[in-house]
Amino acid sequence: MGGSMNHNFDRIVAFIDILGTSETLRHGSEEEIEHYVKGIEGLYSKIRDELPIEKLKMFSDNILIYTDGTSPENIESLIESVARIQLYMLQEFSLFIRGGVVVGVLNHIPTDVDDFIVGKAIVDAHYLESNVAIYPRVVVSREVLKIYDPDSKSIPFVKDDWDQPFIDYLKYAEVDGFTDPQQLMAHRDALIKHIKHDNEMTDCSPDRWDRIRNKDLWALSYHNDYCKTNDMNELSVRFIEEYSVDVQKIIISVTDKGMEAIDSGF
């Protein structure tokens, strides 16, 4: 490792978890596992070829993205990259992601074999992902908001009127600042497909199922809130929660007669 140099300074760091990976790899069918692996391969190609990512590490179901500084431009490029990853994984593979974005010291040490990274910022971003985000969203720390705009403490494309600031990734499905109905419909269809897949899970404890259902309800709330805000209610998802005798649990049923998932307390 001769000639290595320690690059130790503040960066913007995002830690991302692709939800459902362990369940798929442990209990999924051969077809489901192949579908997941194609999703990861496609994601890597998209990141490499299309996204403005400065630094990246992928391992198993986790993605670590970090910048070379803490400027507004660094923050914007990282948030855009994460948002486009969220859109891509849901629309193309019906997979949710969850994550955290923080600012902090990250040691990036290039070596002859590979780069070595360690630092409190990774720990903090992972904590946000695993303990604060809860739902399929990427939470942004208040410190990052303050760095971007010390006066308003807000960032474009970060939604800050729910319980935690998070990346408003559907904003990146817009074209020239206007809602794209085709993108929104693709998001709607992918969300419904994801929920229907979850409803078919049979080997699931009651506590775990409640957590899964709450994630789906949050995603419905986010989609429908975006539709309502942008006068696109025709593309919202209507649903009811009902007991299924087949799987013996309360499931989310998408139906034209259901209620919109808005004001669900998230």
Image: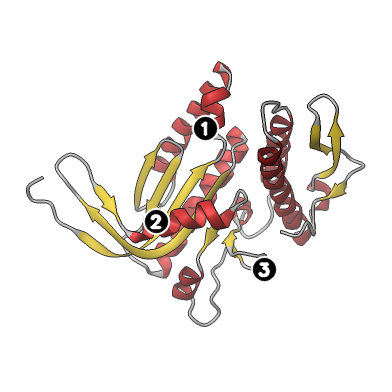
* 226 relative to 206, above or below: below
**What residue sits right under mark 2 in the picture?**
123
Instruction: Judge by depth and name the residue closer to the eye, 203 or 146.
Output: 203
Label 1 SS: helix
Amino acid beneath label 3: Asp
Residue at point 12%, 51% (across, down): 4
Q: CA distance from mark 2 to mark 1?
A: 21 Å
Q: Is residue 12 above or below residue 190?
A: below
Q: Which mark is residue 105?
A: none
Q: Residue furthest bottom?
A: 151
**Label 3 to label 2: alpha-carbon separation:** 26 Å
Which residue has dot 1 on it?
A: 22
Residue 236, position as x, y percentages in the image? 79, 48
- Residue bearing mark 3: 161
The colour scheme is secondary structure
From the viewer's perspective, is residue 232 above or below residue 25?
below
Q: Could you say where residue 52 lies in the image, as x and y percent from the top left?
A: 41, 52
